[in-house]
Each structure stands twice: as C-alpha cells, then as structure tokens.
Image (cartoon, rainbow, N blue to C red):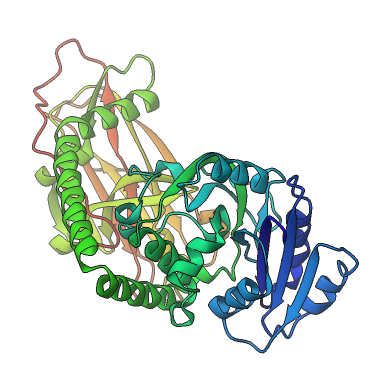
Amino acid sequence: MPKVSIIIPAYNQARFLATAIESALRQTHPDVEVVVVDDGSPDATAEVAARFSSHPNLRYVRQANTGLPGARNRGLRESTGEFLCFLDADDFFHPEKVARQVQALEADPGLDFVYCDILRVDEAGEPLADSYSVGAVGRPLSGNIFQSLLLGGYFPPHTVLIRRNAVAAVGEFDPDLGGHADYDLWLRVSGAGGRAGYLDEKLAYYRTHANNMSNATGEMAESRRKTLRKIARLHPELVGEGIHGLQKVNQDLFHETQWLNKNWRIAVQQLKSLAAAPAEMSESFLFLEHHHEAKLLRGQPDQFAIWDATLDGVSSQALYLQSPAMVEFDLPVADRGELVTAVALHPKVWNQPASIACEFNVRVNERVAFVITLDPALLPADRRWHELKLPVPETTRPGHRIVFETRALGKSTDFRWALWRAPTFSWSKASPPDLTPRPAIASTSLAAA
C-alpha cells in the first residue's frame, strides 16, 4: 500500500493538467500514487492523461460529470494511501511538498492534517508580485483550528496532507457544497477534535486565471452560507464560541481603526507631502485633512467625499468630485509654494459604456492654472494617475484660493467618478500659520458609497 495518494480531479483543465500530474509524479517522497479523476471532461483531458499512462504510479479514472466534490470522492475510493492530498488540475506542487508534510505527520502522531503556505502564480505559472501568505491571517495556525477556520477559510485544498482515517471518521466531501466542500471537511475534522499543523513553507502553487472557481462569486457565496449553516447544526456550541470570537475581532478592529485615524492619518499624509515637495518646501496644507472646511460651489453634498482607489496595485486616498461639481479651498497661507496631486477616473468606470470624457480643472486665485481631459473608456493611456506639480506664486490675498472642478464633456453625467489624489500645497516659511489637525476624517470607500 502506498504511503501517499495524490488525487487530481479534472474537468476541462486539459491545458494545465500535465503540469499538475508532473508535479505529483516528481515528488521526492519515494512512495506516492497519483489518481487522476476525469469528471466527464469534453476537452482533451483524456488525451493529456494518456501521455502518462506508462507511469506505474499513475491511475486514470473517467466518470460522468458529478462536480468537484464527487470527483474528489471517487479519487478517495480509488486510492489506497495512508495519507491523502487533493490537487486541483490547475495547481501544482513543489517537489519537496509531500516529503516535508509526511515528515511532520510522522513526527507528531497527534496531528490529523498538515497544511503549508502557497505561492500565487499567473496563468503561465510565473510568480505574481504579491505578498500573500497563509501564515499572515493573524490567528492560531496549529492545534485545533476550528475557530480560525470559522472566521474564514484561508488555505486552498492542495496545501493539505491529511490522514485517511481522519477523513473516514467524519465522512467524504459533501457533494452539495461545491467549491466549499473542502472547507466543510476541514471544519468537520476540526469540530471532531482533530489537530492541524502549519508548515511555514511555500510548497504549493496556486494558479490564478479567468476560470478559477473563486471567480464565480455568487455561487461561492451561496456554498459558503450552506457550509456554515451545516456546521452550525453539527457543532452549535463551537459555532457560538466562534461568533463570540468574531465579535471580539470586530471590536478590536474598530478600536484600532479609531486609534489609527487619530494618530496616523496626518503623519502618513505629511510623509507623502514631504516626499513630493521640493527640498526647500518645509510646510504643507493637506486638503484631505481640511475637506470639511471646503465650499461646494457646484453640485450636491454627495458629489464630494473622500474615496479609496487602487491603481497599478497601489491604494491611495483621494478627493472624489462627481461631475459636474466644483469645490473651493481657502488656504491660510499666501506664500509661494507648489500644489501636488494626481488626477484619474476611478477604475470601476473604465469599462462602463455610459462613461464619457471628463475635464479636470484647477483654478488658483481666480486664474485657470491646469486643465486636462481624460477618457479612459476609449483611451487606454488614460487608465492611470496623471501627475500634477503646479508652482503657485505668492499672492497679496490673505491666503491662496484653490478651486477644483470636474465636468463631463457631453450630456451624460453617469460614471464621472473623478479623483484628485491626496492634494497637498507645500511652502517654506519660518513661522507657518496655525494648522492644528482637525478631527480624523471618516474615509468613504467605493463599496460604502
């Protein structure tokens, strides 16, 4: 009997299947069987699997389509290994994955399963430029992780190596739970008292592509709800404790957010302004911190807010000015300085058919100082931040008057989600005016808006 069975359910993943099979067969552990379950694929899955038919450690099984849990269960029944691993056909393994996990399970007979970290890769199998780590969830990773799992599944199935007897004790994958059937299994094993061990090594590769099951957000949300309802029926006391823990996490996040708003928002904005300002500029007016003092000259109150926006993988805060709208800031300084910001339309509108060109306009002390028109729906080059560093001469007024305006170039006013990234006016002065920080700003995200 082989020590380890790697079960590969496959449905319409012919283009990735060979990589998955090769990674399973190339494991350094000497005692591995690989069971490929073709779940009625209409593509070339059978032909790809046939390339490996001469390998003594591989079995190919074809069945009528039953869905992912059913294919895993068929592989479970066809396999004979003491330890089990379920590798989706679009993912793959590091060569040492099985050996490291077998070593961990043999070193601690009290562990029911061991799971590892992942490396996210693109469709071509190249590492993505992100820092995701299973181990960064900020909750217990080893021991009985029922409560940790209840807060959210944070590792994909192919990270796990589990004892066959642990699965036999709680039952197979639930065919009614689709993409969350593995989450349900780990919860049932943990709910029955099972212990897990976390191996902090990136030994499993998770491929992201357009057909990932996780992209079917509606179906995944429903299967998650069904899973949690099932687990609540099976383990009501444990779920009650989990809800208590979730409320505690929520309270902690609320207090931490309050503290950050009061103590760090100003510091972060000042650091940004210092990085953007010339060396001789020593003082800054942060428009985000003074947005409640602005005068809305055109538009409605809900057309002016602070939004978070992520462009090119970087998240920034910005003044949101839904066209047509105009807002005025009266600065308490008249010195020569520099206005630094960047403009863009929010990425959510880039592919909207009703989205049309939008004009951004800056007036300084009654004069037009900057104008740009962006149309990201038609021009891919406009799908980015457009940087602005505007020199502002000294004025005889009591202070500078800065006006930001956005307007749509056409009859439609839909999807004019215009953004001004963290506007900052910087200047040099020995005795700057009183810019005592106001109360913290309540950030408005796009989802909340």
Against 99, residue 413 (above or below) is below
Against 384, residue 237 (above or below) is below
Against 200, residue 411 (above or below) is below
Residue that protrudes farthest toward the top in the picture = 430
State the image coordinates of residue 87 (x, y, percent, origin top left): 63, 62
Against 399, residue 258 (above or below) is below
Q: Look at 86% across and 73% down and name the residue there.
A: 50
Left or right, residue 3 beside residue 212: right
State the image coordinates of residue 336 (x, y, percent, origin top left): 27, 22
Which of these two is toward me, 311 or 160?
160
Left or right, residue 121 beside residue 352: right
Which of these two is toward me, 315 or 362?
315
State the image coordinates of residue 226 (x, y, percent, origin top left): 34, 77
Q: Is residue 356 visible?
A: no
The quadrant where residue 189 appears: bottom left
The quadrant where residue 289 appears: top left
Residue that protrudes farthest toward the right in the picture = 54
Which of these two is toward me, 224 or 55?
55
Left or right, residue 239 beside residue 103: left
Marks counted in the figure total 0
Residue that protrudes farthest toward the bottom in the picture = 64
State the image coordinates of residue 411 (x, y, percent, origin top left): 34, 76
Q: Is residue 150 visible?
A: yes
